Amino acid sequence: MLRAMDPPGPRRQPATRIAVSTHWTELRLAAQAQSAHPDARAAFQAFCKRYWSAVYAVMRSRYAQAEAQDLTQQFFLRHLIERDDLTKLDPARGCFRAWLHTALSRFMIDEWRRRTAPARDERLQAELDEQRTLAPALSTSDYERHYAQAVAERALSALHARWAPRFARRGAQIDQATLVSFLIDRDPQQVARQLGIQPDNARQTVRRLYVDLWQLLEADVAETVSDESSVAAELQEVCRILGIEAPERAGQT
């Protein structure tokens, strides 16, 4: 039987090139997960892995852990596959972030209706069908925060995977939390002490970390918009949601 997957571990490091069309092609392939297409099921698994954490975070904000995991699984299978919602995805109509919010909102409304149906007077059913907003709405701000955090976590995990071996060759074991502190504090003395290098080299290391972080974030959001001209705007929006300044762009010093 087709299933989504358990919450994923660290994500494989993405490429830094912009490849908008590839992502949408893979999403259309994932929509055929119940077909006989040989690559469709793998594409669906990759889709689930990419967006699991954002969807699960929304569910977890409302339900206990086990229930949130079950509802996340149901969202990917019942709402997106059995209802063919992925086949309705049209990149020309906007970014993937907005589409996922709409799909998730509808799923949560349907779930609320299912849970509250026995307690509701049947005479109100028609009215409720017309007034979907009576169901607890999924806050756009809450959803977008979880979504943006998932994007940032993917980029930071990939950044750590890229740089940890370099640090290890210098005899420094740097975990992801420490790497994040390098980026936040930007203290060359701290970086120099932990890596055993000179402060001037530490400053250069931090600049290179920011360049790589930008490229990884850019590559991630490029996969969720319809064209390359929208990449910068979407990346700025993700940074705004997180309440952080956009990292230095590649090539800046």
Image (spheres, rainbow, N blue to C red):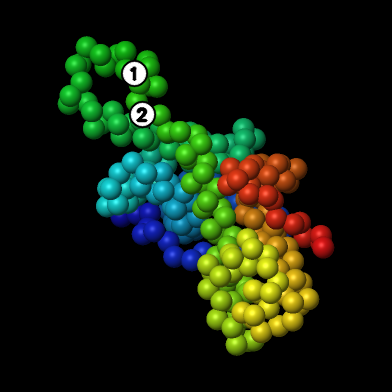
Q: Residues within 10 Å of mark 2 (few under 14, many from 20)?
A: few
Which quarter shows the N terminus? bottom left
- Which SS class for mark 2? loop
Q: Is residue 32 visible?
A: no
Amino acid under disc 1: Asp
- Which x, y percent locates residue 189? 69, 74
**Towards the viewer: 203 or 169:** 203
Q: Which residue reaches farthest left?
A: 118
Q: To which residue does mark 2 refer?
A: 136
Q: Residue at x 63, y 61 (%)?
A: 184
Q: Is residue 110 above or below residue 72?
A: above
Mark 2 vs 1, N-terminal side:
1
Verify CB contact (< 8 Å) between mark 2 and mark 1.
Answer: no
In which image quadrant can residue 129 be found? Answer: top left
Question: Position of 143 compared to 236: left or right?
Answer: left
Q: Is residue 38 above or below residue 222?
A: below
Amino acid under disc 2: Pro
- Which x, y percent locates residue 38? 47, 59
Residue 129: numbered disc: 1
Q: Residue at x 56, y 76 (%)?
A: 174
- Which SS class for mark 1? helix
Q: Residues within 10 Å of mark 1 (few under 14, many from 20)?
A: few
Q: Residue at x 53, y 73 (%)?
A: 175
